[in-house]
Image (cartoon, coloured by chain):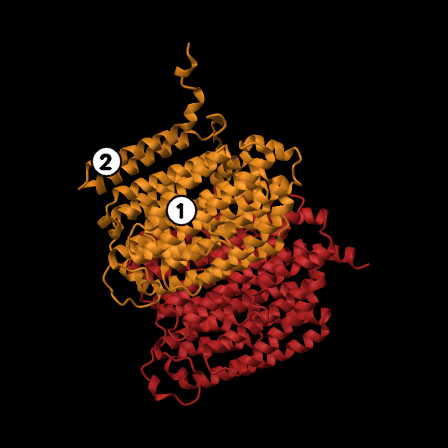
Chain colours: A orange, B red
Amino acid sequence: MNPGFVIPTGWSALLPELALTGLIGLILIGDVLLKEEAGKILSGIAVAGLAAVGFLVAAQWDQPARTVLAGMFRMDMLAVFFKGIFTIAALTTVLIARQTPALIRRGLGEFYLLILTATLGMFLTASAGNLLMLFVALEMITISFYVMVSYHQEERSLEAGLKYLVLGSIASGLFLYGLAFLFGTTGTADLTEMAAVIQGGLTESPMLVLGLFLVLSSILFKSACVPFQLWAPDVYQGAPTPAVAFLSVGSKAAGFVVALRLLIELLLPLGGVWIPVVVFLSGATILAGNLGAIPQSNIKRLFGYSTIGHGGYLLIGIAAGSFLGTQAILFYLAAYAFTNLAAFLVITAFSKTTGSDEIRDYAGLSRRSPFLAAMFFLALLSLAGVPPLAGFFGKFLLILSAVDAGHGVLAGIGAIAVVISLYYYLMIVKTMYADEPADPSPVPVPTTLRIMLWICAAGMLGLGLIQKPLVNWAAAAAQTLF
Amino acid sequence: MMLGPVSWILLAPLIGAALLVCVPSEQVRWVRRIAATATGIPLLLALSLIFRYDPVAAGYQWVDRIPWIPSFGIDYHVGVDGISVVLVLLHAFCAFTGVLVSYRISQRVKEYAIFYLLLIGGGFGVFTSMDLFFFYLFYEMAVIPMFPLIGIWGSKKDRDYATMKLTLYLTAGAVMALIGLLTLYTLSPVKTFDLIALREAFLRQPLPPATQWFLFPFLLFGFGVIAPMWPFHSWSPLGHAAAPSAVSMLHAGVLMKLGSYAILRIALPLMPAGAVDWLPWVAGLACMNILYGGFVAMAQKDAKFVIGYSSSSHMGYVLLGIACLSAIGLNGAVLLMFAHGIMTALAFAAVGHVYDQTHTRILSDWGGLIRQVPFIGVAFAAAALASAGLPGFANFAAELLVFFGAWESYRWAAVAAVFGIVTTAFYMLRAVRTGFYGPLNPKWTGLKDATPFEKIPYLILITVLLVVGCWPQSLLTLIQSGTGPILEIIQQASVGVLP
């Protein structure tokens, strides 16, 4: 029998990606065929398709890890965990996009397409088993975002797109350059073989260290960490809200899956070189994000800064360089996904009615829409890390991992930043609850957003009160690396 | 699994809050009824526990334990010992009377009740948790609702600044304590957050004295912020002044006790050698609390600021009692937490009653109110006399014990602290005189005294003060069974440390 005609058994590992690719094709064709009423039908297809992809991803949980495509693609628990987060983020982004008037005017079909191509890129990033695959996957994410960020075609959005494009290209260049060094010193582009070579005792090679830092720079750009964080506030303020929501959750998670794969799985033997640097950058990022957020008056810009702060917190887990740190990152990312998406759902619903993203316009929201105000309150408290919400347990684990790894000062910075972040988050709460509204008309909440908000609220409270399941899942996923 | 009474005390307010989310906000009557039930049930349970607690068997009783996150050694683990059973009762009294006092609130009642019940649940959680993770969780849960409670329903003039300052101070303290707790967890030979297991582990294998010396301040000052230990006390009078009456009652009555309780419950038994090293300094700070708070209170013209500074002064006695590290000092400290909590709730309730009608808290603007509101006037005078240490009120017995303890352990501190009594008598009695006696200010002829229903909370609080004042042994037996084990640990450590 001709082996070329047999579908290799390992290909079932690719099912979610294949489904996603099919979905992309469907949306592409649909957008061309149904020009007029494309928006509604396509969003229905995208949501249903993503839900199906979600099921395929969930079905892969607890399956044994395997490698297909000659080592290019790895299906393991860590990848599946991240794909779950990406799916939730993409699905919510589609629903947010549907409620963003500026996007509706411009035509939604292409936007859905971009969301899905970015998602496919994220899926492949999480599963990449080879440096080349990793680079291609990352570019897929970044290029999709270039277009999404500048989708409004107005000055601010274009400026944001350009900034993201220029800085993103530099980061991609650095990444490629770094990969070249990694390949050059180890003689292979396959991550598994590379790990074996490095563990075999290649730690002193200066070329390897150079490659490491180039790659690290690019990761820092992706996840908006010091010293490559400057783009975030501008882009967040200028870009369409769904793009920002996806950027803050999906793209950040993608940055951290690369960090886990390269720094923890591959380069932990070189920990002595990079851990002190990451400890410093983590502390600096936490402070830069949280201090920068204080004077902001635009809610999206404020989230631009606060998201930098959250990136800093996640770096604590990398700096810990331990199983506990990895587990903490995974828990935090899942909690952060629900929380941040809830916040962006509120921002979307609010700006749909009022057309404003200014914090002062949130005055008296608790009377204009008690539901929205309450949800925003929950999300802000969870972001700040107040128990019994999901964000608290994430921070708890991260700070514990820092203490456990002996980074006492970093843990202290992380703890103090909770207080700083509470200040600017509570200022918003005060505006919503204590100030008088300038315009007391009610703010209606579309049903889909309402349902999504309830789901996010259940996620925030559920993960905050009953942490055990997610802790165990995160442990199972983190086991992949150790 | 069946939950015991302690769990229900803790759950009742939280279930009440969840129910309130589903009640439409126009149903003010039902909102109030639910709030009263959700705090009334814990009060009845707490009273029954006080009578049923067995001080001979001592230790934790009515323990409930559910494994929560086994991989981190986190359990839902609650119960009460001799100390916490008394403080749970204090909290239950303040919570229930606070609801009755809050019947005057007419604006956004439902939201108020939800935040209020969350705060109550958090407080009960702190006093009953035997697991450090849940302890911290409940602690923050008791602090954060303060922000909206003061920020929305507080007095307009100063609430924005006061509520932010309060929340940030208390959270800063909490995260500092959290770092200490997490370090203890990583250093302990058993990977668990269970207080009892940690205590036993550290008893078998104590931390090196240098480590204890380094770690103790994290818990001491972290929890000390809420105690409120000088010089971290400045959030507290501001917060009292801006808060609505019931929140001031809880804030001064219960919240401030969370700090000294945490020091007593966690810091002392886990790091006894650190305690022996650091507590003389605490005695000094406590004297600063007493004297500084007392002198500042003497200069105040605003009734709530007088009581606010007086609270921070009197919490100095609690800290001093703990610093004594002797049976008499610790017992006195715990009894004073109870007595001061009830007394200060009474005082804030009375001031709130007047303020809600006069919209001024400046004592000299009041004048002669006793003729117009005799009941409230008597209640305030009772609180003032209790605070000044009149025999017959619970505060007298408690402060006396603290003085005896201080005289044995730090004679200089006892001498300094006596001046606190003098200042208390001065500012409290002056407040009664300027506010309630003298010629009646003609502006207040329309003032209404408490209705029979409104009298209930005052009567409850005064009765408790008198009953405990005349029969302090009732509570002291319980308290002693709780402080005994802590002292044993301290004594073992000081034998080991001091040759």
Q: Which mark is residue A30?
A: 2
Contact check, label 2 and label 1, Cβ < 8 Å:
no
Q: Which is nearer the N-term, disc 2 or disc 1?
A: 2
Which residue is depicted at the point 55% across and 53% down?
A281
Q: Is disc 2 surrounded by few (<14), some (14 to 19) or many (20+) residues within 10 Å?
A: some
Marked residue chain, label 2 = A
Identified by mark 1, the residue type is Phe
Depicted B18 relative to depicted A181: above or below = below
Camera-near label (2 vs 1) is 2
Instruction: Judge from the rendering whether residue B52 lies leftward or rightward of residue B498; answer left or right.
Output: left
Marked residue chain, label 1 = A
Q: Position of residue A237 (x, y in %)?
A: 36, 57
Q: Is disc 1 surrounded by few (<14), some (14 to 19) or many (20+) residues within 10 Å?
A: many
* Among the 4 quarters of the image, the one containing residue A280: bottom right
Q: Which mark is residue A338?
A: 1
Labels 2 and 1 share a subunit: yes
Q: Position of residue A415 (x, y in %)?
A: 54, 57
Which residue is depicted at the point 51% across and 37% down?
A472
Which residue is depicted at the point 48% across and 62% down?
A291
Of residues A189 and B233, which is closer to you in this image?
A189
Instruction: Judge from the rendering whether residue A41 lies leftward or rightward of residue B138; answer left or right.
Output: left
The residue furthest top is: A1
Identified by mark 2, the residue type is Gly
The residue furthest right is: B499
The residue furthest left is: A36
Instruction: Judge from the rendering whether residue A450 lies leftward or rightward of residue B478; answer left or right.
Output: left
Disc 2 element: helix
